[in-house]
Image (cartoon, rainbow, N blue to C red):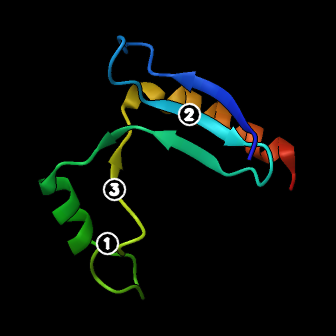
Amino acid sequence: MRLEFIGIDPDTLKNGSPTVWVDGVNADIVIQSYTADEETRGECARNTAPGHAQGIPDHETVIRVPARLVPMLREACDAAERAQL
């Protein structure tokens, strides 16, 4: 794995640092962010994608990405597309 740093929440202090990277091997976008609270997890579990089982699979999680990271997510998407893997 080779992670390319894209950006960090501009309002972050020393603790709590929502961050975005792109994996240079497979162009996956990797996000570190806040764990979603129980209310958000419950809402996600109830509102599943059509054709999928209800709930959150054990191998997945729900995170919250601050709106301030949107520009970095756009940049990460562009970097992943440029990789053309």
Residue holding disc 2: 20
Q: Between marks 3 and 1, how big is the CA–CA gap? A: 8 Å
Direction from residue 79 to residue 30 in the image, left or right: left
Q: Between marks 3 and 2, how big is the CA–CA gap? A: 16 Å
Image marks 3 and 1: residues in contact by CB distance under 8 Å: yes
Viewer-proximal residue among 83 and 51: 83
- Helix, strand or loop at mark 3: loop
Q: Earlier in the sequence, mark 1 or mark 2?
A: 2
Neighbour class for label 3 at 10 Å: few (<14), some, many (≥20)? some
Q: Earlier in the sequence, mark 3 or mark 2?
A: 2
Residue type at the position of mark 1: Ile
Residue at point 14%, 55% (across, down): 38
Residue type at the position of mark 2: Val
Viewer-proximal residue among 38 and 47: 38
Q: Indicate the position of residue 63 as horizontal and vertical percent values.
A: 35, 48
Q: Which mark is residue 56?
A: 1
Q: Which mark is residue 62?
A: 3
Q: Indicate the position of residue 4 as horizontal and vertical percent values.
A: 72, 32
Q: Indicate the position of residue 59 as horizontal and vertical percent values.
A: 42, 70
Residue at point 58%, 23% (across, down): 7
The C terminus, quarter of image = bottom right
- Helix, strand or loop at mark 1: loop
- Helix, strand or loop at mark 2: strand
Which image quarter: residue 52? bottom left
Neighbour class for label 2 at 10 Å: few (<14), some, many (≥20)? many
Neighbour class for label 1 at 10 Å: few (<14), some, many (≥20)? some
Placement of 63 over or under 49, stated as above or below = above
Q: Earlier in the sequence, mark 3 or mark 1?
A: 1
Placement of 36 over or under 72, stated as above or below = below
Placement of 43 over or under 84, stated as above or below = below
